Image (cartoon, helix red, strand yellow):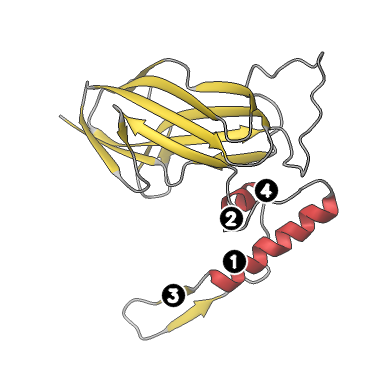
């Protein structure tokens, strides 16, 4: 994982993209094999073009995550089991491990079903009920500071569900903190152009039974 660095000009952005691409080329070992045959090979990702979202995944996130369900800490790739109709308390904490503040952060939680065939279903109005905000805005998260958000969710029908937890910002990540003017209004919604998105990876998996 690459350490976060300054992104202040188009030239530095291109340079960072090349660094991330080179990092993937050196570390990704992608092999393929045709079934019912002895034909196999190795694929290269050299020269891959990375979007800003892809670079946010490759680079080290400036946030440390703590996710819990009913006060039980959820580890990456750990599945949580519950019964349909059970009331669950979802807690999300983010800590800024940079030595400078982060501004205009939007922390969001979204529930969906992954059918493991490329289809994701986000229309869960009759399957999931929530209480509390699924999005909150953090005007400023100071260095080493922690923010916590909690909401309640009830899965009404059995099935395999996932929770996409992400934090986005409209501010570029600079070597120096951006100047915040006294008369500048704080962002109150998650709308607007997004510069960076950091996710809790992989999404939290919830298995709901009768």
Q: Residue at image x 65%, y 16%?
A: 188
Nearer-N-terminus badge (3/2): 3
Q: Please report contact status of discs 2 and 1: CB closer than 8 Å, yes or no.
A: yes
- Determine the image quadrant of residue 103: top right
Determine whether 36 is above or below 168 in the image.
Answer: below
Determine whether 33 is above or below 68 in the image.
Answer: below
Nearer-N-terminus badge (1/4): 1
In the picture, the disc for residue 52 is 4
Nearer-N-terminus badge (2/4): 4
Nearer-N-terminus badge (1/3): 1
Camera sees residue 123? no
Residues at marks 2 and 1, CA–CA distance in whole angstroms: 8 Å
Nearer-N-terminus badge (2/1): 1
Q: Residue at image x 61%, y 23%?
A: 138
> Which residue is the site of mark 1?
24
**Horizontal arrangement in the rendering, residue 46 relative to residue 81 (left or right):** right
In the picture, the disc for residue 97 is none
- Give the number of callouts: 4
Front residue of 103 and 125: 103
In the picture, the disc for residue 58 is 2
Under tag 2, what secondary structure? helix
Front residue of 118 and 112: 112
């Amino acid at each position: 994982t690459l350490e976060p660095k300054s992104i202040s000009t188009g030239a530095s952005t291109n340079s960072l993209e090349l660094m991330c691409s080179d990092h993937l080329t050196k570390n990704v070992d992608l092999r393929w094999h045709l079934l019912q045959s002895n034909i196999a090979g190795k694929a290269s990702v050299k020269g891959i073009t990375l979007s800003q979202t892809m670079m946010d995944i490759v680079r080290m996130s400036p946030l440390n995550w703590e996710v819990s369900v009913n006060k039980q800490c959820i580890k990456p790739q750990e599945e949580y089991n519950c019964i349909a109709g059970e009331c669950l308390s979802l807690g999300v904490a983010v800590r800024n491990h940079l030595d400078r503040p982060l501004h205009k952060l939007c922390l969001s939680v979204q529930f969906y079903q992954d059918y493991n065939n490329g289809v994701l279903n986000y229309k869960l109005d009759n399957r999931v009920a929530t209480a509390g905000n699924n999005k909150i805005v953090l005007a400023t998260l100071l260095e080493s500071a922690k923010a916590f958000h909690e909401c309640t969710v009830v899965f009404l029908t059995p099935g395999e569900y996932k929770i996409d937890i992400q934090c986005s910002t409209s501010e570029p990540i600079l070597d120096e903190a951006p100047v915040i003017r006294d008369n500048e209004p704080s962002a109150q919604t998650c709308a607007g152009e997004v510069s960076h998105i950091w996710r809790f990876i992989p999404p939290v998996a919830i298995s709901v039974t009768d």
